[in-house]
Image (cartoon, rainbow, N blue to C red):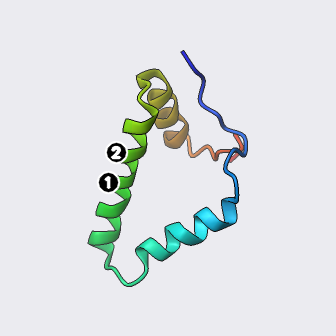
């Protein structure tokens, strides 16, 4: 079983964030929420490890950032 990575681990994080924001540009809240839901499911499928996904859910519920702080 792998552990969830909560430390910075994204190459070019600023570029990713800009791409994520651009994906939401010009769409309403309903479509934005649907995009986020689809993205979560695509990434969950890519991860494929239920134990890691449960760790991610728990971290998100605790409002923990990827750095492990609030």
Give how far across and how far down residue 69 sits, in percent: 71, 44
Q: Nearer the viewer, residue 55 or 50?
A: 50
Q: Quadrant of the N terminus?
A: top right
Q: Is residue 16 left or right of residue 32?
A: right
What kind of element bears circle 2? helix
Residue at the (50%, 27%) spot, across then down: 52
What kind of element bears circle 1? helix
Q: Quadrant of residue 28?
A: bottom left
Q: Nearer the viewer, residue 41 or 28?
A: 41
Give how far across and how far down residue 31 sits, in percent: 28, 70
Q: Residue furthest top?
A: 1
Query: Is 61 placed above or below 18 here?
Result: above
Work out how far the residue at label 1 is from the one at label 2, CA to CA, in angstroms.
5 Å
Q: Nearer the viewer, residue 61 or 32?
A: 32
Give how far across and how far down residue 18 sits, in percent: 59, 72
Residue at the (43%, 44%) spot, across then down: 43
Q: Is residue 1 left or right of residue 43?
A: right
Q: Is residue 14 left or right of residue 55?
A: right
Residue at the (45%, 28%) spot, across then down: 54
Q: Quadrant of residue 24?
A: bottom left
Q: Which residue is mark 2?
A: 41
Q: Residue furthest bottom?
A: 26
Q: Which mark is residue 59?
A: none
Q: Residues within 10 Å of mark 1 (few under 14, many from 20)?
A: few
Query: Is 50 placed above or below 16 here?
Result: above
Q: Are marks 1 and 2 in contact (CB under 8 Å)?
A: yes
Query: Is 60 placed above or below 22 here?
Result: above
Q: Which residue is mark 1?
A: 38
Give how far across and how far down residue 35 sits, in percent: 34, 62
Residue at the (51%, 28%) spot, across then down: 55
Q: Residues within 10 Å of mark 2 (few under 14, many from 20)?
A: few
């Amino acid at each position: 079983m792998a552990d969830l990575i909560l430390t910075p681990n994204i190459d070019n994080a600023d570029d990713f964030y800009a791409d994520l924001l651009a994906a939401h540009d010009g769409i309403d809240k309903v479509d934005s929420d649907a995009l986020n839901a689809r993205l979560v499911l695509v990434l969950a499928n890519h991860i494929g490890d239920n134990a890691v996904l449960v760790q991610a859910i728990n971290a998100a519920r605790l409002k923990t950032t990827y750095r492990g702080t609030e």
